[in-house]
Image: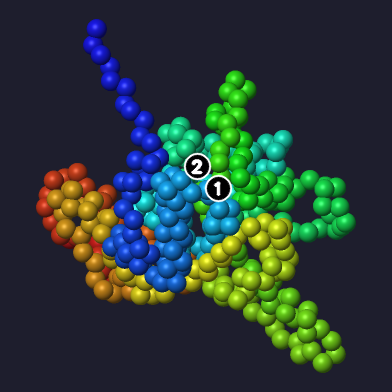
Amino acid sequence: MQRVDVPQKVSVEERLTRIEMQSPRAIDARLERLGYRGQRQARKAAAILAYRHLQRLRRFHLDGAAPDPGTRQNCLFIGPTGCGKTYLIELLFRDILEIPTILVDATQFSETGYVGDDVNTILSRLFAQAGGDLSWASCGIICMDEFDKLATSRSDSRFAGQQTTKDVSGFGVQRGLLSLLSAQKADFPPDFGFTSRQPPLSMPLQCITFIACGAFSGFKGVVDQIDDEVRIGFGRSVKARPPEAIAVEVMEEELTRTTAFARYGFLPELIGRFNRLVAFAPLDAGSLKAILVDGVLAEYQREFGDEGMNLTADTGVLDHIVARALQRETGARGLRAELARSIEEAAYEHFGQGEPRTICLRLRGDAIVAES
C-alpha cells in the first residue's frame, strides 16, 4: 500500500518568523511599489497600524508576553467611494504581511435571531480563511466594508427605551459588534451555523485588528447642522447650504465629533471602540491618472499582449477619462467604466484572429475610439 504523507501543520511561531519585520516607512514604500497611489496621510496611518499589529503578534507568540488589551487597534477608515480604502487593506495585510484577512459586507448582517448572518459568523469566515487553524485565525484582520450602512435614524418610536423596538439591521448589529471590538474572546459556529452538529469554538480576540470602512455620505452635513443649532437665535444669520457632493473629504477634527456620529445613527459606545479614525481624501487628477496608466490600462495592455497585439492610448484619452471620473465622483472605480466600452469594441473586432497589430485609443469629440 502506498504511503500517504500528511502535511505537517505549521505553527503560528513559524509563520510569524517567516514574515519580514519592516519599518512603517518600508511598508509604505512597498505599497507604492505594488501600485497604490495617493492617500499619503492615510497610508502612513495604515503602515503604522500594520507594524503595530505584527509587533503585538510577535510579543505574544514569540516573546511570551501577555497581551495588553490597551494595545489592540480598532480603526475606522472614512472616505468617498473609490478612494482606495479596502484596496489598501488587501495590499497591506493580505499581500504584504500575508496574514488571515477577510473583507465582509456590513449590509448582510442582522440582529441575532433574525434572517441574515449573525455578527459572530465573521469569526467563522476568519477561521475558514486561516484554513481551520484557530491560533492563526486569532492573529488576523477583520475588515467590515460599508460600515456606514449600519447607521440608523432615531425615530420617535424609540424615545426613552432603546430596547423597546427592534432594529434588526442597524442598532441590533451595532450592539452585536460591541463585544467583538472589545471582548477578550468570543464563541463562533465553525460551520457558519448551518447545522447544530458542531459545538461552537472560542476564538481569542486580543490580537485581532478590526477595521471598518465607509463613505459616510452626508456626515459633513450632520456636523454643519449641529454647528448651526449651536448658533441658533435672533442674531443668527441664515445661510443657504449647497447640496453635499459625493466625493468630499471629512476633516480630522470633524472625526472627533461623537455627537455627530450619534446624530448620524451610531451608538456612541461603538464609535468609542475605535481608537483611530482615519480620513481618506477624494483622489485628485494626478493620482487618478497614475492609477489609470499603471493599473487599469496596464492590465488591458497585458491582455492585448497575450493576443499578440500592442495597445496604446493618446494623452488626450487619458485626460478625458480622468476628467470624467472626477465629474462622476466615483474615484478609481470610474476609470474602468469609462475605458471598458472602447476596449470591448476593439476586443470584439480583433481577439482570436491571431493577427499582430497595434491598437491605438484616440479621442474623437467626446468619444473614445480604437483604431488599428
Mark 1 belongs to which amino acid? Gln
Which class describes the residues within 10 Å of circle 1: few (<14), some (14-19), or many (20+)?
many
Task: Relative to 285, say whether 71 is above or below.
Answer: above
Residue identifier under label 1: 206
Task: Relative to 322, say whether 210 is above or below.
Answer: above
Could you say which is closer to the camera, residue 317 or residue 333? 333
The quarter of the rendered structure image containing the C terminus is: bottom left
Relative side of 84 to 238, left or right: left
Are circles 1 and 2 on residues that touch, CB within 8 Å? yes
Relative side of 283 to 30, left or right: right
Disc with the residue nearer the chain's start (1 vs 2): 2
The quarter of the rendered structure image containing the N terminus is: top left
Residue at left 70%, top 83%? 240
Task: Residue 207 in the image: state x and y as whole percent.
Answer: 51, 48
Residue at left 55%, top 69%? 246
Residue at left 35%, top 67%? 25
Residue identifier under label 2: 138
Task: Residue 80 in the image: state x and y as whole percent.
Answer: 52, 66
Residue at left 49%, top 71%? 281
**In the image, farthest residue toward the bottom:** 235
Q: Give the SS element for disc 1.
A: loop
Relative side of 47 to 349, left or right: right
Task: Relative to 96, say whether 195 is above or below.
Answer: above
Which class describes the residues within 10 Å of circle 2: few (<14), some (14-19), or many (20+)?
many
